[in-house]
Amino acid sequence: MALAANKVEATEALIAAYPAPEGEGKWSRDARARALETLRQSGAPVRRDEYWKFTNPARLLEPVKSATIMETDEAPVFDGVDKLLVVFVDGVLRADLSDDLTMEGVEIETLATAMSKDIHWVGDVYGVLEANGQKPVPRPFAALNTAVATEGLVIRVTGKATKPIAFRYLRSGLDADVMVHTVIKLEKGADLTLLENGSGAARFNSSLEVEIADGAAFHHVRTQGRDHARLAATHIFARLGKESRFKSFTLTVNGALTRNEAVLEFTGDDAFATISGASAGDGAYHHDDTVFVTHNALNCESRQVFKKVLRNGATGVFQGKILVYAHAQKTDGYQIAQGLMLDEDCTFLAKPELEIYADDVICSHGSTCGAVDEAAIFYLTSRGVPKAVAQDMLVLAFMDQAIEEIEDEALAEEIRTRLGDWMERHRG
Amino acid sequence: MLKIKNLKASLEDEDKQILKGIDLEIGAGEVHAIMGPNGSGKSTLSYVLSGKGGYVVDEGSATLDGADLLDMAPEERAAAGLFLAFQYPVEIPGVGNMTFLRTAVNSQRKARGEDELNAAEFLKLVRIEAKSLKIDAEMLKRPVNVGFSGGEKKRNEILQMAMLAPKMCILDETDSGLDVDAMKLVAEGVNAMRNGKRSFLIITHYQRLLDHIKPDVVHIMANGRIIKSGGPELALEVENNGYADLLNEVA
């Protein structure tokens, strides 16, 4: 179907806004051309599009406005973790601030290096998982990212990584509009933890493609920084082989607009994936989790666990889908999205979807939104716990179901602490 | 200790007065029991005293050692020494029993200007109290009241009471849902806390609990008022004859 003329115009304007990279190798030129073609077919998103009804894409399309940088004296997230640190400033990798990109069992290259070659293994993954994830739901900002991103890493994991790789996204410019694209390929039996933290830019578009071979495991824990005015459109595309594991958790506090998309596909049997998030917003805050899990293999288990605490005009969105093909018998799919409203001014919008063609599956989904339990508040306060503390305890308990999805207890504990700090700063 | 004068209170959402003039005075170290038919306002009295939302005080006063209870937030009442053992203890998923207890104990200590207990000091105390109530480590680790049996919930209430060491304890139908052994255990927990300074108000339907916790005074409540007060024999009279005679007497 041809796009409406105004949509074509908006799409061309979007493409024109970002310079096309030059002087790259053959595989990347091909990948970028395919991505542009995808983008031209789907078009830039508009509010009428099915998956943009709850989140207005306008601010992701317009020229970026400057967003103030939050100055804090807190230690950076994951500071206490032994890690291979990779620092990006305004979306640009800074070797001078980063550790050496070497670790046993892991090959790390910059995206730019890989792009400069005519042939590279990453050509089989870069933009490929993203392209798979464009059907049936278009993800225009991911296509744009594939078409123009030059920053990011290309990582091949052949064994068990000895420590996590940690991306720290710093900001220096108030109006940086950046794209980061990272590809991770886990070979058979490999194991890697990726940590990400920071706001990254005034507008931050990230794409993470993860190919997980048989028996490999990928862990991902992310926090999206504390800047209030920043915009983010992030994407995770993962393909899971036989008996592989995928775990991803995101903590989002603050941020004017966040759209976190995750597209997971099981292609090998007996694999496990969990995608979870805890988000907390006060005031001008719009947070959107859009998740699509495809079961294309036998006996796989997927979990989607999203918790949002909202106050003072904040909006939380969840769009989550589980698609189970006819041959994907014994699928166990779980999905829960819950909003906790601390006052009557906030909004929680949820669209859970199940599309199941197999007949021997367990798929459950639930979505609730409500206020803090007054009976529990009274119980706690009647024991002498101040009301504000009692409310924090209940909010953290509510969020914990998502945080518990993190495998590493020390990382989970850090997330709890960060969230607890946020609660303390945002008492009503 | 506790002085209640002409206390009248209504439901906030309905124009319905539940307490219609309660007068009650409990001295230091005394144990009072309140009995009465369903709907007489016994639980409402406990809620109004402890500060639960949804009630409006129309008239009267309630003071604890001279301090105006009705003017305080629930946590202030607790810090002042008031404790309510709930008829239906609330389940709080995600909040560990120990975390909750320690936060409660230390919040009260802080409010009273006392030093907070560190983890080791707290653990030592809680182990002693839990042992005498036959509460095992597993129960302490679980989320507050989640998955607890009726008896476990009530024992958990008494554990909280023991840890918080209040001066005025209100027990709202603590015997309901308890088997004979559990009731004995709870009663022993309460009796162990009795001393010349600590007072109790025990709300119950049955004489049985009062066999284990001997009251000094028994009050009969009906239709939002205390209609008769007397010694422990009053509870026996109710047990044998029901409330009908007493209600007729007043009418």
Image (cartoon, grey):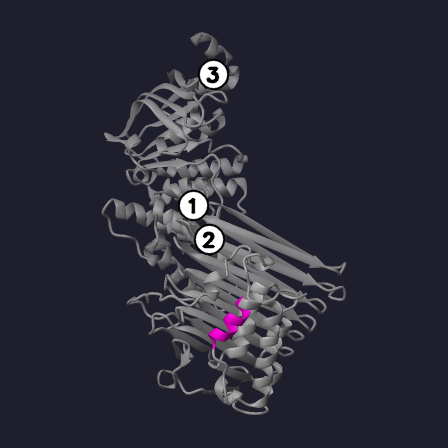
Query: Residue tagged by mark 2?
Result: A315
Q: Which mark is residue B198?
A: none
Instruction: Tell me the subunit letter for badge 1.
Output: A
Alpha-carbon distance for marks 2 and 3?
61 Å
Do the numbered discs 1 and 3 sit on residues whose CB atoms are within 8 Å?
Answer: no
Report the amino acid beneath label 1. Asp
Which quadrant would residue A174 be assigned to in this image?
Answer: bottom left
Residues drawn in magenta: A10-18
Q: Which mark is residue A345?
A: 1
Q: Secondary structure at mark 2?
A: strand
Q: Secondary structure at mark 3?
A: helix
Which quadrant would residue B112 be assigned to in this image?
Answer: top left
Do the numbered discs 1 and 2 sit on residues whose CB atoms are within 8 Å?
Answer: no
Where residue B152 sits in the image (x, y, percent)? 50, 43
Q: Secondary structure at mark 1?
A: loop
Query: Residue tagged by mark 3?
Result: B237
Alpha-carbon distance for marks 1 and 3?
56 Å
Report the amino acid beneath label 3. Glu
Report the amino acid beneath label 2. Thr
Within 10 angstroms of label 2, few (less than 14), some, or many (20 or more) residues? many
